Amino acid sequence: MLGKDRARDGAFKVATLSVSLLIVLLSVVAFVSVLSWTSPGDLLSALRSQRIAYALWLTFSTSTVSTLLAMAVAIPAAYGLSRYNPRGSRVIEAIFSVPLILPPVAMGAVLLIFFSSTPLGEALNTIFGIVFEIPGLVVAQFCVIMPIATKTIKATFDSVDPMYEALAMTLGCNTWQSVRRVLLPLSSNGIVAAGVLCWSRAVGEFGASVMLAGATPMKTETLPISVFLRLSVADISGMIALVLIMVTTALLVFVALYRSGEGRAVVGV
Amino acid sequence: MLKVERLSKSFGDHTVLKDVTFSVEDGETVVLVGSSGVGKSTLLKIIAGLLRADSGRIDVNGSVVFDSSEDSPVNLPPKSRSIGYVPQDYLLFPFLSAYENITFGLKGKMPEHEMDSIVAPIVSLLEIGNVMNMHPRQLSGGQRQRVALARPLVLRPKLLMLDEPMSNLDPELRDRVRVEMRSFLKKLGATTLYVTHDLFDAFALGDRVAVLMGGSVKAMASPQQLLKSPSAIEVGRFLGLNCYRGKVVSRTSVDINGVQLSTVELPIEAGREVIISFRPDCVRPFTRGAAPLPNVLRGKVLEILPGVGTVNLDVDVGIEVQCCLTRRDWDPLGVTENGEILLHLALEDVSVAEIGSNHFSGSGSG
C-alpha cells in the first residue's frame, strides 16, 4: 500500500511539474519562432534606432511616474479601507475594481470624453495638457494600475495584525508614526510587489494610452504603441526588437522581485 | 496606583464588561483571571487607551486617564497614559533587532548614548545583553519574552500590563518561562496587571487574583484567601473547588442537598443559606477500615481522570465531589469506574460563608 501511495505521489508530482514545463517550452518555442522572422543584423540596427531609444525612455519614465502616483494614492486609500472599514467600504472597493474589468480601450474612451467634453475635464486638460500629449499616457496608465495597487496593498495591510500599530501607540507613537514606523515596514514586501506589478502593467499598457494620448511617432510612442505602429507598416524586425526588449525587461523585473522577496524572508521581514 | 471604576463596554448588543471595578496597589502584581472570551483583553486595551469604554473611570498614579462623565470627560491617548503593555505573542517588531525593539519608544526623544544608559540596567536585569543584535525570529521563547518586557520598561511606565504572555508557549517552555517571569516581576518591583485564563499562572504570579466572570470582577483577594473563601459558587467552581449552596443545620454542621457535613464551630445561625467549599486535594478517598471519623461519605466513582503524577476523581456521594490525589495514594485503592468508594474530609478543610457576606469559617489549608 505504501509503495502504491508513493508511486501515485510521484506521478502527481511529475504531472504538475510537466504542466509548468510545457508552458515554459511553448513560450520559448513561440519566442524563437518570432525571432526567426528577422536576421541578427536587422535586429541590431532596429535596437540601435533613435525611435526605439525614445520609446524605451518614454515608456520607463511614464510608467515610473504613474506607478509613483498610483502608490501615493493607493497607500492611504488602502490604509483607510483596511483599518477603518468604513460603512459602504464594499461599494468603494467595487468602484475601485471597475477598471480591472473594464477593457482598457473602453477606459481610454471614457477618459478621452471626460477630458475633451466636460467642463472639469477640459479645465484639467487646459492646465496639464492631457489629450494626445505625454501626460495623457501617465493618466491612462495611472487609471489602469491604481486598482491593482490599492487591492494588493489593502490585502497586505489586512494581513498585518493591527495590534502591532496599537502596541507602537503604547510606546509613544501617534497614528501617523505607528503607520510609518511599524505598518509600512511590516508591509514592505507587499508594497514593493504592488509597485513592481503596477510598473510592469504600466510598461505594457496600450488600450487606454492609445485612446487618450494617441499614437504619434516620437511623441506618445511608448513600447506597446510602437509595436502597434511597426505592425501597421509591416516593420517586423522593429516589432521583434521591441518585443525582445519587453520580454527581457519583464524577466529582469520578476527575477529581481523574487530574489528580493527571498532575501527579505531570510531576514524575517 | 491603578483604579478602575464602573467600567462598561458593549459591542453592539453584546455587553462585554459591566461595571468593572478593581484597583492595583503600588508595587503589587494583580492577576486578572477568567475564561477565554470573558473580556480580559478588552479590559486591558481599554486601560491602555487602545479601545474606548462606554462608561466608567480609570486613574493611573492619581491622574485620570479616562472619565466618561459628561461634566469633565477625559480620554488620554495611549502614549500619554504611562502604561507599558506586553501583548499576547509579544508582537516584537520582526524587522528590528532586539536592541532596536527595546529602544523603539525612546528613538527620536534622546541621543543614542542617553538611550544606552537607560537600556543597560534593564537589559542587565533581564539578562539579555547577549541577544541585542539578534532579530526576534532568532530568539528563544524566553528571550523573546524578556525583550518584550524590556521594551515598555525602558519608558519607565507607572503600570505594566501583560496580556496572556505565555498563552502560546508549549508546556515545557511555559513552566520555565513562568518561573523566570515570577523572578523578574519580583526584581522589577513594578506595579503589574497580568491577564491570563490559566489558574496556575494566576496563583504562581499574583499577589492578588481578580476573577473576571460575566463581564465583571466577581472576586478579588490573595490566592490563599480566594481558595479558602470564594465569594460566589461560580467563582469557587471556576477556581476548581468543590463549591455548593447549602444550609446551616447546627453550629457544627451544614447540609448540602441532604448530605450533611461536619464543620468547625460556625458563627452563623442555623437555617441560614451558605456557600460551602473545599479543595479537591483535601478529600481523602479510601476503601476499607473506616475509622469512626466525621465526614466519611460513601459514594460511587463516576469518572477517573488519570494524569502523570495525580489522578482526578468524580464521585457521587449524593452531591458530586471532585477529588485529586497522588498516584502513590491512588494505585493501592484498586477502584474502577462505578465502583464504591469512601471519602473523608477534615473539619477544618470545610469553608462555610454566608451568602452575600464576606465572613468565612473554616481554616482551609490553602
Image (cartoon, rainbow, N blue to C red):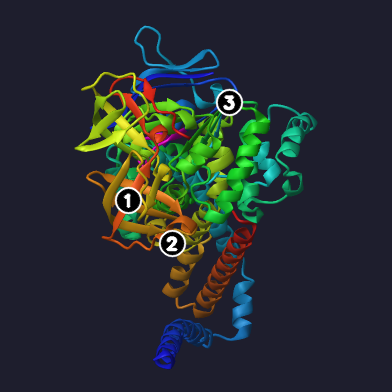
Q: Nearer the viewer, residue A10 or B23?
A: B23
Give x and y (percent) for residue A236. Answer: 49, 79
* Residue drawn 62% across the image and 70% down it: A49
* Residue drawn 61% across the image and 33% down it: B152
Label 1 marks which chain's residue?
B
Q: How many residues crowd around disc 2 within 10 Å: few (fewer than 14), some, or many (20 or more)?
A: few
Q: Which mark is residue B342?
A: 1
Q: Earlier in the sequence, mark 3 or mark 2?
A: 3
User: What is the magenta range?
Assistant: B32-40
Label 2 marks which chain's residue?
B
Marks 3 and 1 share the same chain: yes
Tag in front: 3 or 1:
1
Q: Which mark is residue B191?
A: 3
Inter-mark Cα distance, 3 to 1: 47 Å
Above-or-below relation of A58 to A28: above
* Residue drawn 51% across the image and 54% down it: A190
Q: Secondary structure at mark 2?
A: helix
Quick check: is B215 in the magenta stretch? no
Q: Nearer the viewer, residue B158 or A263?
A: B158
Residue marked by disc 2: B332
Query: Picture quarter containing residue B274?
Result: top left
Marks 3 and 2 share the same chain: yes
Inter-mark Cα distance, 3 to 2: 48 Å
Q: Amino acid at mark 3?
A: Thr
Give x and y (percent) for residue B186. Answer: 64, 32
Label 3 marks which chain's residue?
B
Q: Earlier in the sequence, mark 1 or mark 2?
A: 2
